[in-house]
Amino acid sequence: MELDEGLCVTDCERCPRLVDSRSRIVNGVGPADAEIVFVGEAPGADEDEGGEPFVGRSGTVLDDALRDAGLARADVRITNSVRCRPPENRDPHVDERENCRGYLAAELAAIDPEIVVALGKVPAENLLERSVAVTDEAGEVYDARLGETSHRVLVCVHPAATLYDRSQQDTFESTIQQAATLAGEGDGDGSGQARLGEW
Ligand code: URA
């Protein structure tokens, strides 16, 4: 397995369709000893260009919720189920998730966080290996085994869901707050500094 220090994939050609559609492999970012790891679906256009997960509109939603929970992006690890951008931003196929699963397992094993947050249906189903109704199960914590290690997985709606359905905003924000509480981090009560736009 071509993993750099257990965290970064430096070379991979397991998924021919993704090798064609990607500009680069987008590895996780954040501390190697983070207590919270966020797992998304796959890089989009912004992430493929910038080389970092969640730097587009979804990333702004995530950053805002982190700040409201008293967390900084630099304090948490952010990664994806699949590290290469799928064509036309389609969901990664099952075989592509399988091909990338060992990399995610190695990353989570190396970090050993208090809590893994599954951002949306794809990562929730990838981690829990069953179908997940994310809006119903948001806020639920499950044990998941990946490779040799077990992790506590908190189900969360995808940040992009809040852009299409404003009613998901409260669920999203309270689940991020819950992650901070479970990890013993953040300001503990969700009263993080309000966003400048709200002043
Ligand atoms: N959506 C994801 O699931 N991952 C990203 O990195 C960006 C958007």
Image (cartoon, rainbow, N blue to C red):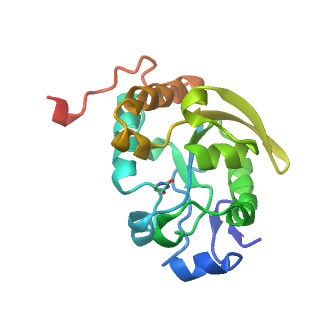
Could you say which quadrant of the image residue 95 lies in?
Answer: bottom right
Please state the horizontal and vertical placement of residue 21, each as a whole percent of the image.
Answer: 52, 78
Image quarter for residue 5? bottom right
For the question of whether residue 114 can be seen, the reply is no
Q: How many marks?
A: 0
Question: What residue is rendered at 76% in x and 45% in y?
Answer: 129
The quarter of the image holding the N terminus is bottom right
At a point 24% along the width and 33% down the height, the residue shown is: 195
Residue at 68 percent across and 66 percent down: it is 96
Q: Is residue 38 left or right of residue 55?
A: right
**Residue 107, horizontal then vertical, whole percent:** 68, 54
Residue at left offset 73%, top offset 41%: 128
Residue 77 visible from this viewpoint: yes
Query: Horizontal and vertical percent for residue 89?
Result: 48, 65
Between 190 and 100, the one lying in front of the other is 100
Is residue 195 toward the left or the right of residue 105 in the image? left
